[in-house]
Image (cartoon, helix red, strand yellow):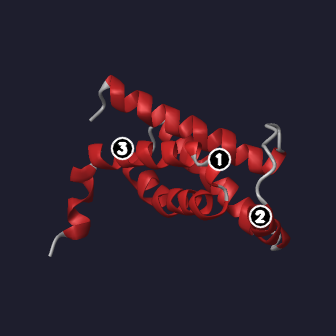
Amino acid sequence: MNSKFTQIVRILLGLILVVFGANKIYSFIPLPSPPPEAASFMTSLAATGYALTVVAILEIIIGLMLIFRLWVPFALLVLVPISLNILLFHLFLDVPAIGTALLVIILNGILLYKHRRKYKPLFAQ
């Protein structure tokens, strides 16, 4: 479960989450202008005053948990709805920028599969 491949996938996913989570708060990576529908959606989330900040903080925490190998199976489960929403956002509102979303979903899926034995008690009858 802790092969070199798994370590690389875990650390890469953690770095992606920390960087993009921090970018939601500090905006240090210039991102291309999204389509009007995506911009409107993001503006609505920002107007709540908390939604984007909560997602950013969760991404940073999950990313750090993956990088430092803390509660990895739990972190991966918490990441599932976040990564699914990232994918759906890009699928429906910003298809040209879907690459990173697909990468996050694939890396999360690989790690979930690698830790599948840890999840067996969740599905026991």
Mark nearest the camera among 2 and 1 is 1
Q: Name the N-terminal-most of marks 2 and 1.
A: 2
Q: Amino acid at mark 3?
A: Leu
Which of the pair 103/111 is nearer the observer? 103
Q: Name the N-terminal-most of marks 1 and 3.
A: 1
Q: Which mark is residue 111?
A: 3
Please provide percent x and percent y for residue 12. 51, 33
The residue positioned 14% from the left and 76% from the top of the image is 125
Residue at disc 3, secondary structure: helix
Please provide percent x and percent y for residue 58. 61, 56
Residue at disc 2, secondary structure: helix
Q: Which mark is residue 42?
A: 2
Q: Which mark is residue 97?
A: 1
Q: Amino acid at mark 2?
A: Met
7 over 89 or under it: above or below = above
Residue 85 appears anywhere in the view:
yes
Q: Amino acid at mark 1?
A: Ala
Which of the 4 image quarters holds residue 88? Answer: bottom right
The residue positioned 49% from the left and 32% from the top of the image is 11
Q: Which mark is residue 37?
A: none
